[in-house]
Amino acid sequence: MVEKHIQLAENSVEKETTTINLGPTHPATHGIFQNIMEIDGERVIKTEMTVGYIHRAFEKIAERRPYSQITPLTDRLNYCSAPINNFGWHMTIEKLVGLEVPKRVDYLRVIIMELARIADHLVCNSVIGVDTGALTPFTYVFQWREKIYEIYEGICGSRLTTNIGRIGGFERNFPDDTWKKIHDFMDGFPAVLKEFETLLTRNRIFMDRCIGAGAISAERALNWSMTGPNLRATGVDYDVRVHSPYSSYNEFDFKIPVGSAGDVYDRYLVRNGEMWESYRIIQQALDKLKGMDSSIFHADAPEFYLPEKADVYTKMEALIYHFKIVMGETDLPPGEVYHSVEGGNGELGYYLVSDGGRTPYRLHFRRPCFIYYQAFNEMVAGGLFSDAVVTLSSINVIAGELDA
Amino acid sequence: MTKEIIQERLNQAFSGAALQWAEPWGMLECTIPADQNLAIVTFLFQELGFQFLTDITGIHYPEQEGKELGIITHLHNLKDNIRLRLKAFVPVAAPDIHSLTSVFSGADWMERETYDFYGINFVGHHNLKRILNVDEMDYFPMRKEYQMEDPTRLDKDDEMFGR
C-alpha cells in the first residue's frame, strides 16, 4: 500500500488524492482515449480508462457491405500495420469458401505482412524513446518506415490505409521498381536497426526509465487475455504464426523472442527481437520466390477476383463476373469461421457468421488493443506517474483498433 | 489432450446439460445451456486447461423464438493448442447470463462491449455499463431491428442490391 502524502480528518469534505485527466487529447496518449487518474503526489493510485471516442460502428457497417468492401474497414483498425488486417480479412473469406491460394501469393503476403510488422514496431519502440526524452532515434527510423510505405504505395497506390490485396491474391503483380525498393530496404535496414539499438538498448537513462516500469506477471497477462509482444514480454511464447499457422508461416524458420519481467524494457526488447526475426522471414521469403513463376499473383477464383479489363469487353463470363463483383453480388456459403492472424499488437481475430448472403450476417473483430488495454490500471497502479506515460506508449494502444 | 477427450469429459461432467457438439471449419464448437455457462467455463479452466479467453461476443437471431440472443465465447487451450467455441442462447425478453469475470479478468471489457451492443445482462459483472457508445443511448444498436440506413429514405432504396 502506498503511503498517502496528505492526511485529512475523517469527516473532511476534501480529498486526499488529486484527480487528473490524461486525455482524451493529450500528447502522452498518442490517440484519442481518456485516463481519469487518481494521483497522490507523483504516485498513481488508480486509473479509470474511458474509450469509444472514435467508435465508428464497423461491425454494424460490415453487416451491409459486400465482402470485398469490408477490406477498407479493416485498414482503420490498427492503421500502423494495415496490410496485416487486410490480409487477415482476405484469409478469413478464403477459409470460409475453401479457396487455396498459390504459394507465391502466400510468400508475397508474408513479405508485406512482415514489413508491416517492422513498420508497426518501429513506431512503437521509437515512441518509447520519445516519451523517455530521446527524440533522435525516432527521427532516424521514421525514414525507414517511410521506405516501407513507399513499397506499399508501389503495390496498391496508398500508404497508410492500404486496402492492399484482394480476396485470392493481389490486384496486380509487384512492379519492378517496388522489387528494387524491397531489396534496397533489405540491404540498408540491418544497419539502421543496429544503430537504433545502439542508441537506446544500453542507454543508461533509457534503462532507468524503462526497467521495472509497468510490469505485469505472465499469469496476470494471460488472465487479462493479453496477446502479442506485450504477452511475450512476460515470458509466454504464444504467437499465432506458430500456434495456428496461416499463409505458409509453418515453412519459415524463425524464433519467438520472449522477455521475463513483462515491463516496458522487456516489451521494447521483444519488439526489437521481432523486427530481426521479421527481417529473417522476409529474407527466406525472397529466397523461396527465386525460381517460382513470377507471373502468378492471384488464385483462380473468378467469383472474387476481378477479371482483366480487356476480357470484360470481349468475353461474356468475364463481363458477368465483373458485374457481380463490382455490384457485390457474390454469395458466400453459410457457415461460421474464426480466423486469427498475428497483428502488430497481438492476435487479431475475425469471427464471421455467414447466412449464405452477399454480406456477413455478423462480423466481429477481436481487437488485441481493446482487450489488453483494460489491464492498464493493474500495470500502473502504485507506480510513478511518469512510468504510466511510458507504459502507455510501450503497450502500443492504437485508438483505431481500440474503438473499432 | 485431444478434442475427443474434451468432448468426453464435458459430456460426463455435465451429463444433464444436453451439450450439442459440432466442428465447423475445424473449430470445436459446443452449444451449452445459458444457465450453466459459468460452471462449464470454470470446469474447462480448471480441469481441461482452457486458460486463455480469446473473445466474447454476441449475435442476434430475431427469428429464433425464445433464444434470440447468442453469446459466443472463444476459449483456447494454449498448452495443447486447441480452440473451443461455446455458444449459449438467451431470450431477448430476459437476456441474463453469468459473467465470466470471476474466472477471466479479461472478460470485463468484452462483456461490457457485448452488453453495449446487444443488451445482454451479465449477472455478476461488477461494472456493467456502456463502453463504446454514449452513456445516454437507450437502445442496443447491433440488434437486427436497428437498420444501418434510415428506412424511410427513398434515395437509399436497395430493392435490387442489398437487404
Image (spheres, coloured by chain):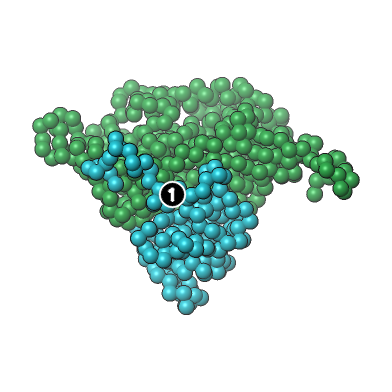
Chain colours: A green, B cyan
A255 or B101: nearer the viewer: B101
Q: Is residue B46 visible?
A: yes
Q: How many marks?
A: 1
x 13%, y 40%: residue: A317
Q: Residue A101's quadrant in the figure? A: top left
Q: Residue B102's quadrant in the figure? A: bottom right
B21 or B96: nearer the viewer: B96
x 47%, y 78%: residue: B16
Q: What amino acid does circle 1 point to?
A: Met
Residue B112 image point, x, y percent: 55, 51
Left of B103 or right of it: where is A10? right
Farthest front residue in view: B152
Q: Is residue B41 visible?
A: no
Left of A381 or right of it: where is A25? left
Residue A36 image point, x, y percent: 67, 39
Residue A181 image point, x, y percent: 38, 24
Question: Which residue is under mark 1?
Answer: B142
x 67%, y 25%: residue: A133
- Residue A381 to residue B80: above or below: above
- Residue B65 to residue A302: above or below: below
Farthest right residue in view: A9
User: Mark 1 packing: few (<14 Cα in 10 Å), some, or many (20+)?
Assistant: many
Residue A87 image point, x, y percent: 37, 40
x 45%, y 41%: residue: A57
- SS of the residue under disc 1: loop
Read off the chain for label 1.
Answer: B
